Amino acid sequence: MQDYQAPADLLKDRIILVTGAGSGIGRVAAKTYAAHGATVILLGRTTSKLEEVYDEIEAAGHPQPAIVPLNLEGAAVKEYEEMAMTIEETFGRLDGVLHNAGILGTRSPVELYDPETWNKVMQVNATAPFLLTRAVIPLLRQSDSASVIFTSSGVGRRAKAYWGAYAVSKFALEGLSQLLSEELDDDRHNIRVNSLNPGATRTNMRAHAYPAENPQQNPAPEEIMPIYLYLMGRDSDGVNGQQLDAQPK
């Protein structure tokens, strides 16, 4: 999977939603999916960043994307349902979701952790993916091969001291991924759900988490895209309920 060679037309005519598409791994994944033929729905908080990605995809001659500005920290249930309705009216279905949006919060002992920050991290990293997935399940059922990818973390599989709400939120995502992989695994629909740990990657979040680290020692987001393509394309049909890693351990 980590060395997967994706066909150029792997995602031709597929409709894929990417959260956190304005920067980091989400931005690169959105552009990579578009380069392989997908119509990408760009979801994020900052419209100007989404517009930059939109323009880059169009300039490259890839399928015209769509933009969904949404602040996951404050979005209400109705906003997710309205988003799903708009996607249904425009595209009729959804073939994939990459849950990439997330925030780090603070790194501190639990006894000193600010409750407001805790709630914010849990809202963006765990509750928002639940609400979004809940809203689009009917659209995923309209696909002949749908994939949902939850972005995990090493500290979401084995907690480490001082990672606070970030670690707990990623544990929650692992649980949601496992839950949905069983609930949506039936003979009537082809929906697969997996979690993916990108590992140490050259992103702004990594730089904030490890300010003393040399970022050049980590791969750029572009270098870990093979498994993102594999999981979103039909070659991963049947891969369901797995905890996967984008980089060798």
Image (cartoon, rainbow, N blue to C red):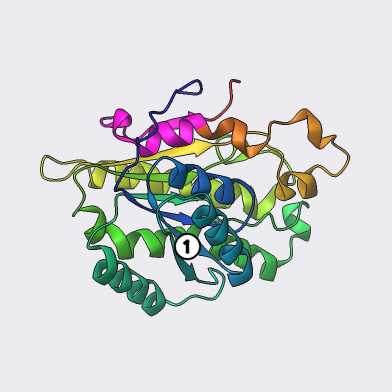
Viewer-side residue, 77 vs 162? 77
Q: Residue furthest left?
A: 188
Residue 95 placement (x, y as % from top left): 29, 49
Residue 248 placement (x, y as % from top left): 58, 20
User: Residue 6, relative to residue 144: is it above or below?
Assistant: above
Write down the residue under mark 1.
127
> On the image, which quarter does residue 20 sit in?
bottom right
Residue at 68% in and 54% down:
104
Say few, some or many: other residues with alpha carbon within 10 Å of mark 1 (under 14 / 14 to 19 / 20 or more): some
Quadrant of the drawing holding the N terminus? top left
Task: Kindly state the secondary structure of the residue where label 1 is placed.
Answer: helix
Quadrant of the drawing holding the C terminus? top right
Q: Amino acid at mark 1?
A: Thr
Q: Is residue 67 magenta?
A: no
Residue 57 placement (x, y as % from top left): 51, 53
User: Residue 97, relative to residue 220: is it above or below?
Assistant: below
Q: Is residue 233 magenta?
A: yes
User: Residue 29, relative to residue 199: is it above or below?
Assistant: below
Residue at 57% in and 66% down:
51
Give the magenta part as a residue range.
226-245
In the picture, measured across the screen, residue 145 lies left or right of residue 155, that is left
